[in-house]
């Protein structure tokens, strides 16, 4: 009995060509998430530093500048700082909440196509005014 074996050399190439775009999408998504998470950690640290400065007696303008200076690896023009309560009604023993909002823009264009133009990162810290 003479059976001819079919040549299957190209099959793995076709399977790889089908799976490769999905693997690249997953890899780029992981990298993009890492950059976004790094930005979130930077914002969290900046909100802590800003709240601590206010709790030690800094005025709102100095606190906003502290927040801006603390986000060295992010675009400072996209940062929104909210301080509650405002300086005029704040007194010793009050709780002050600093909220930082940042519009994170994706680095890869096809992530924008999937998730939109930007993603809003929000973090807040509450401390007692000393």
Image (cartoon, grey):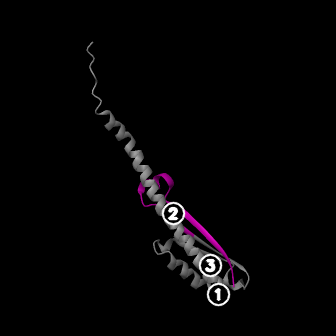
Q: In whole angstroms, how far apart are the C-alphas of marks 1 and 3? A: 10 Å
Residue 46: which quarter of the image?
A: bottom right
* Residue 105 visible: no
Q: In whole angstroms, how far apart are the C-alphas of marks 2 and 3? A: 21 Å
Residue 51, which numbered label? 3
Query: What residue is disc 1 on?
Result: 57
**Placement of 27 over or under 101, stated as above or below:** above
Q: Residues within 10 Å of mark 1 (few under 14, many from 20)?
A: some
Residue 37, which numbered label? 2
Q: Are marks 2 and 1 in contact (CB under 8 Å)?
A: no
Percent from the top left, x then y, of residue 84?
67, 76
**Placement of 5 over or under 99, stated as above or below:** above
Q: Front-most of 52 and 64?
A: 52
Q: Earlier in the sequence, mark 1 or mark 3?
A: 3
Q: Which residues are magenta?
A: 101-130
Please tell me whether mark 2 sits on a helix, a strand or a loop.
helix
Q: In whole angstroms, how far apart are the C-alphas of marks 2 and 1? A: 31 Å
Whether the magenta-drawn stretch holds residue 107 is answered as yes
* Residue 88 visible: yes
- Rendered residue at 42%/52% (across/down): 27
For this view, does 2 lie left or right of residue 75? left
Q: Residue furthest front?
A: 1
Percent from the top left, x then y, of residue 23?
41, 47
Percent from the top left, x then y, of residue 64?
57, 80
Q: Are marks 1 and 3 in contact (CB under 8 Å)?
A: no
Q: Earlier in the sequence, mark 2 or mark 3?
A: 2
Q: How many marks?
A: 3
Q: Residues within 10 Å of mark 2 (few under 14, many from 20)?
A: few
Residue 29, which numbered label? none
Whether the magenta-drawn stretch holds residue 35 is answered as no
Q: Quadrant of the N terminus?
A: top left
């Amino acid at each position: 009995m003479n059976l001819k074996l079919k040549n299957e050399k190209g099959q793995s190439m076709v399977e790889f060509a089908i799976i490769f775009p999905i693997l690249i999408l997953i890899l780029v998504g992981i990298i993009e998430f890492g950059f976004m998470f790094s930005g979130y950690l930077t914002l969290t640290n900046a909100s802590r530093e800003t709240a601590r400065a206010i709790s030690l007696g800094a005025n709102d303008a100095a606190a906003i500048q502290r927040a801006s200076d603390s986000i060295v690896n992010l675009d400072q023009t996209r940062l929104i700082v909210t301080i509650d309560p405002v300086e005029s009604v704040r007194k010793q023993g009050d709780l002050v909440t600093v909220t930082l909002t940042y519009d994170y823009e994706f680095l890869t264009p096809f992530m924008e196509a999937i998730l939109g133009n930007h993603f809003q990162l929000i973090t807040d810290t509450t401390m007692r005014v000393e």
